Amino acid sequence: MSTTTSTNTSAGLAAFDRTTSIWGPITLALGLLISLAAALYAAFGSGVGITPVELVTAVVAVLATFGIIAIIEPISYFPILGRSAMYQAFLIGNIANKLLPAAVVAQANLGERPGTRRAELIAGSAIIGAVLIHITTLILLVGVLGTWLVGTLPAPLIATARAYILPAVFGAVVLQSVMAMRNRRVTIVAVIVAAVIVFVVVPLAPALTFYATALAVIITIAASWFTRSKTPPASAAVAPDEAATGDAAPAAQITEPTR
Amino acid sequence: MVLAAVDPSSTDITPLIQHPVLWALAAGVFAVVILQSVIYFKAIRKAAPAVGLTPAQVTSSVRSGAVAAVGPSLAVALVAISLLPLFGTPAVLTRIGLVGSAAFDVAAAGISAGTQGAQLGGPTYTQKIFALAFAAMTIGGLAWMLSALILTPILSKGDAKLRKVNPAVMAIVPTAALLGAFFTLAFSEVVKSPVHLVTMIASAAAMGVCILLAHRLRRPWLREWGLGIAILVALAAAYFMTAA
């Protein structure tokens, strides 16, 4: 009897693994290709006259800043999400602030902890529920209501929203990242490096403007590494970057719903 | 006729940010997400008995996930609406709503505009700059998808090696990269004008209040809503400063 059960178990899971290991990558790759098509259309198909060199320059500047985070993030989410849910999470986005809490709440409701096969299926189900809500709110509130609302707002208001959205976003994001990371040493290093680059280096060498952010990232990583505390950190939690992919503190977001 | 309205140097970006082709591709991304969810739901329901999950438990997990996502989804919607004037509906729906995130995509857009010596939203924000920013933030975002595609099979096979990456590296590198990037981006905004400086301070202050109240009053949703609230407060401050 027990052998039959385990055979059924492995057969059932084998079918699941087969389906998700084929369709997970296919759907993620499909999302990737459609996004790429949109990017290439905007750059070359829409008639705005962007040259390949201009696009490559911009992409290199972006990747030099965020490329390393894009590689580290999947590694830090893998243990919580499991293989199949990785393909869901990186297609859907908003991982730390939405998908992880949803998965953890659903697992806690059924008394399951991350890491088991049962937990993986529960996480997958919870992510599907989260997607339903998320897509509905996006289409109704942003696509329909938001577009209408922005269309009715007076022009000066829209102009202000456009002109000052960057400081309005970065002020909050900087504070949020500092609070989420809880690493005083790296924070101090980052403030000093960023200040020297923006207030001293760029005014002296304006040619470096393009790569100021990337330069700051590399120097901050190096300086933080060499000034790191050699004793093992008390808060060993690997902080998956969430300011880049989500909007909130991962540790707090993950643990709060289960408390 | 819409195509005729495209003019690279025009600061009226509406024809391009609401371009039908971008709408169609945004719909495509949504369709892929729905397709994936349907395939996964079927596969999960089939495999559920094998791990001791009843159909009712699968349904209840979907429901828990949906309920847990209400707050975050509304919070994301608020941030997304505030970015509509800058990026337009299709770009916001796909980049901010799905796949990417507000912080990364706004940062990426700002960095790409900078490579042309232009600024987002200002008098130098032409159709061409929008197109370049959108293309660069989208291609930058592909790096996450690509690394998930490549790393997931590796991690699930012999993940021992990758997971044993020095924990100090995993703790310090992303933290340093993120803080270095956002402090630099923030300081670069500060030097643009006094209004930029005050807008940024207003944003950080509003976020600080949200985080503090979330902690003091034990209202975690306040932290979730922090970014949206901070953006509104900061933009209101900017509006009153420039209108005065």
Image: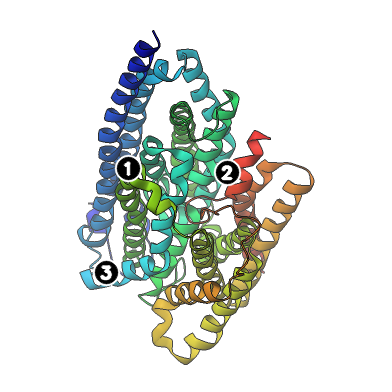
Of the numbered discs 1 and 2, the one sitting upstream in the chain is: 2
Front residue (pair A99, B4): A99
- Inspect the image, locate mark 1, and give the three-letter code of the amino acid beneath it: Lys
How many numbered marks are there?
A: 3
- Determine which residue is flagged by label 2: B75
Asked whether residue A176 appears in the rendered view, the answer is yes
Tag 2 and tag 3 share a subunit: no
Disc 1 to disc 2, C-alpha distance? 37 Å
Instruction: Please report the residue visible at 39 percent of the width from the left and 41 percent of the height from the top.
Output: A86
Front residue (pair B141, A121): A121
Q: Left or right of B149: which side holds B214?
A: right
Tag 1 and tag 2 share a subunit: yes
- Determine which residue is flagged by label 1: B157
> Residue B244 location in percent, x, y?
67, 69
Front residue (pair A149, B179): B179
Q: How many C-alpha atoms fall within 10 Å of the one at disc 1: few (<14), some, or many (≥20)?
A: few
Disc 2 to disc 3, C-alpha distance? 33 Å
Looking at the image, do the residues carrying marks 1 and 2 touch, with CB atoms under 8 Å apart?
Answer: no
Chain under label 3?
A
> Residue B200 location in percent, x, y?
62, 67
Q: Secondary structure at mark 2?
A: helix
